[in-house]
Image (cartoon, rainbow, N blue to C red):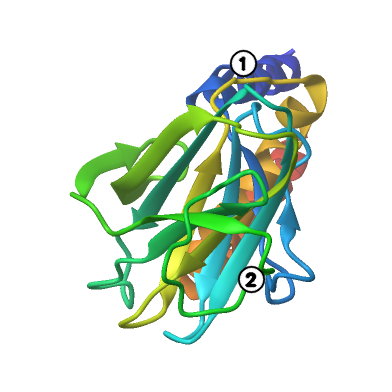
Amino acid sequence: MKRKIVIFAALFIIIFSVPAYAHKPIFEGKDLIFSNPAVVPDYQISYAVYGELKTKEDVDFVKFSAKEKDTFYVEMTIPVIKGNEDFKPYIAIIGEGIKEKADLPFKIPQSYGAIVLPPGPQNYFYEKFTQTAYYRAQSIRGEIPKSGDYYVAVYSYDRGGKYALSIGEKEKIGLIDIITFPYIYLKVKYFFNPLKTVLITGIVIIILIVIIKLIKKRR
């Protein structure tokens, strides 16, 4: 009976914690170059791309396919973590439907235009899901001028750092999101602070093992 109560309580916490973190995560694996970007399946659903600029020369690209006159939303958030001090990346929205020709520190196809969002005011906020503090930096909401592929480039003139780039605003939570919630939680924590996450996870596992052994002895 006690075991059922514990399981129910755990499921209750997971189910009601997921809405607090509605972004579907995409993690940077290999370097996100123009020819091999992170791909957002649906740019209107809320996704978060967790990436890192290794150096000030590094540029990360995120790609999405959009329809003319649809609304899109992009927002940059910067985690407040050690090693991320004074990291203020730029964002460029790039695509054939964009007429503006911005000055960029990297090359794009001649038929593409670009809109640049420089670092803006940084508004502090705390995300309960990962217990991580962020700065909410620049964002843009607009209308797709022409159907086709678009890219969001993340780059910096000063230094590298870690970021979470949000694309889309509609929250869509499914059964898979609920089931994978603990895994995603650990993966996000590990992305921002690998050593601390490994240590805490190890301690929790040891405590669980000790508790299970004590329960078995009492039986």
User: Circle 1 sits on which residue?
Assistant: 12
Task: Please name the amino acid that badge 1 sits on.
Answer: Phe
Q: Nearer the viewer, residue 152 or 27?
A: 152
Q: What element carries label 1?
A: helix
- Image x and y of residue 70, in percent: 63, 22
Relative side of 196 to 97, left or right:
left
Q: Residue 66 is drawn in which quadrant?
A: top right
Please name the residue shown 46% across and 79% down the image. Answer: 105
| Other-residue count near label 2 (Cα within 10 Å), few / some / many at <14 / 14–19 / ≥20 | few
Task: Please name the amino acid that badge 2 sits on.
Answer: Ile
Q: Is residue 209 visible to the viewer in this orientation of the structure?
A: no
Total numbered circles: 2
User: Circle 2 sits on which residue?
Assistant: 108
Relative side of 122 to 102, left or right:
left
Q: Residue 160 is drawn in which quadrant?
A: bottom left
Tag in front: 2 or 1: 2
- Image x and y of residue 54, in percent: 51, 83
- Image x and y of residue 161, in percent: 41, 74
Q: Is residue 178 visible to the viewer in this orientation of the structure?
A: yes
- Image x and y of residue 121, in percent: 18, 49
Please name the residue shown 48% across and 87% down the image. Answer: 57
Q: What element carries label 2?
A: loop
Asked if residue 140 is positioned above or below residue 132 in the image, the reply reads: above
